[in-house]
Amino acid sequence: MKTSEKKSGENKDSDNNQNNNATDKEKPKSEKTENIIAIAVFAVLIIIGIGIFTGWFGLADKNAKDAERIRVPIDNDPFTGGSEASVVIVGFSDYECPFCSKAEQTIMNILKKYPDEIVYVFKNYPLTKIHPNSYNAALAAECAKEQDKFWEYHEYLFAHNTELNEDMFKESALTFGLDSEKFNECFDSQRYKIGVDKDIQTAGVVGVTGTPTFFINGIKLVGAQPEEEFISLIEDELKKS
């Protein structure tokens, strides 16, 4: 019995020694695995940090712009620019808005720099609660369009947007040699009310809430931004064409 117990004890000691040896062997492997995982996590964090700092090397910004493109319906809207332009700028504006007047001048300057590459489409978005003459100004400009004098009349309204009233609209028609009888009849009957109202509805559909708001190949740009902001987007779009 004693011999058997001794052997049993030796076996037990042997098992314990083997377990301890196995544990000792596993420890370096476990620590090595943990170190590899820690290094990998650290590397991923560094890459994420660099990506955030650089905008994912420009890819995130590009993808965001593409994802945010909005298709703006264009009807019988006045437009100017190159007949084969690859960049379309759609502007929602208000003739009595001072920021719109400033932005319109920026657009005209850009059109001179890119006469063939850009086409500019104008849409009305009169904010009548704060600009009581803006709606009638839009109607008047549409009546000028009927006699092929839209852009001349349009620029004049913006240049004199603190003087807008019914008398001014009709007198300005004479300034540009329009048939006053036809113009007055068009204006007084609100012939283009449906068109102006449709512009306002379209603005709501594409998310316009203030003026001026522009869409450059569908990319939204809000406010009287510096010319450089427009040019940056335009150049990006031209590179893709």
Image: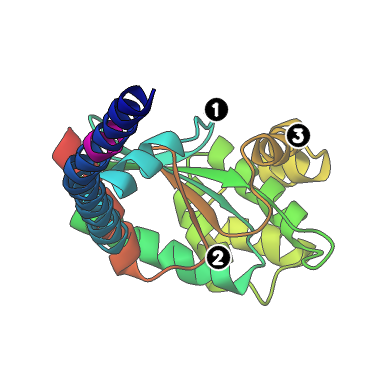
Q: Earlier in the sequence, mark 1 or mark 3?
A: 1
Of the pair 132 and 24, the residue shown nearer to us: 24
* Residue 39 place in picture, x, y as percent: 20, 54
- Tag 3: residue type? Arg
Indicate the quadrant containing the C terminus: top left, top right, bottom left or bottom right: top left
Q: Earlier in the sequence, mark 3 or mark 2?
A: 2
Residue appearing at x 29%, y 56% in the figure: 45
Q: Nearer the viewer, mark 1 or mark 3?
A: 1
Q: Which mark is residue 73?
A: 1
- Tag 1: residue type? Pro
Of the pair 237 and 129, the residue shown nearer to us: 237
Q: Is residue 205 left or right of residue 33?
A: right
Give the magenta part as a residue range. Answer: 15-19
Corner quadrant of residue 42: bottom left
* Residue 197 place in picture, x, y as percent: 75, 37
* Residue 201 place in picture, x, y as percent: 73, 35
Q: Secondary structure at mark 3?
A: loop
Task: Tell whether position 129 is magenta.
Answer: no
Mark 1 Cα-neighbour bin, 10 Å: few <14, some 14–19, many ≥20: few
Indicate the quadrant containing the N terminus: top left, top right, bottom left or bottom right: top left
Separation of marks 1 and 3 at Cα, in angstroms: 21 Å
Q: Which residue is mark 3?
A: 191
